[in-house]
Amino acid sequence: MNLEGARPVPNIMFASVGVHGPVLSPVAALVLDVVLLGAATLLLLQDRRLTRHQGVLLLSLVAVVALLRVLMANLPNVQPVTVAVLLAGASLGARRGVAFAILVTMLSNAILGDGYWTLFQAAAWSMVAVVGSRANLIENDRLLLGRATLFSAALALPFGAITNLSLLGGGVGFSQFPALMWTGMPFDLSHALGNVVVMLWTGSLMLRMMLPVDVPDAMATPGAEADVHLV
């Protein structure tokens, strides 16, 4: 499988943990998915400013970004998720950005391969969303492209470090972590370069799709029912 943030492991590790970390039982995998989905749902339900229109838009964006990740899976670490999550945090705030990150991870991994590593990928992309919400990447509804590009590249290394944590245990200890990070450095650099290309190419377009639009709730507008009744 070619998952963003995944990288080869020294041969001594294959027998014990495989490429993505310890294997979960079906029950444990189900519990993990329920916890992640519950966390994303709770974050969205607690956001009282989230309208139905914005909720539908967010879920549509989740589906689009997850699909793009699947379609680009053969390009190692060159995928749009990190850029999309960074901009989601910047435009929608930390709470919606984290929910967006979790849902994209779960939906795309349902096709690419779900498991223990999903937790760490969701955590890494959630970190990206939180950074995006605090990085001041937007000014007057316009993307500060240079700043956003620098952040997207710089976040590749901490993203790789967090996803590598999924390999600890089952024979892989903290003493081997520096070697693991060094082995994965080419993948982190590929991730950073891919983020730069995606941000420069589609960053402004993604932001326009994500910026909240205030659309009145028709059912909450006085007289709305009269407009839709056919008498």
Image: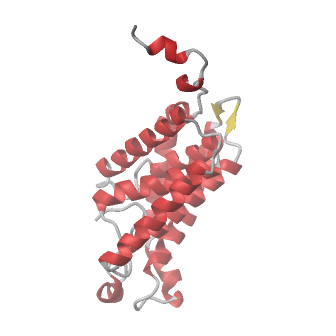
Q: Position of residue 219 (x, y in %)?
A: 53, 25
Q: Nearer the viewer, residue 9 or 83?
A: 83
Residue 95 visible in the shown view? yes
Residue at 51% of width from left, 42% of height from top?
Answer: 199
Q: Is residue 179 above or below residue 84?
A: below
Which one is nearer the viewer's eye here, 192 or 25? Answer: 25
Residue 162 image offset from top left, x and y in percent = 53, 70
Identified at 50% across, 67% down, the residue is 160
The residue at the far front in this view is: 231
Q: Is residue 23 above or below residue 147?
A: below
Picture residue at 46% right of the left edge, 79% below the top: 180
User: In the rendering, at what x and y percent does residue 119 appear?
Assistant: 46, 69
- Across and down, in percent, residue 198 comes to 46, 43
Q: Quadrant of the N terminus?
A: bottom left
At horizontal 38% and vertical 49% (from top left) the residue drawn is 66
Tally of marks: 0
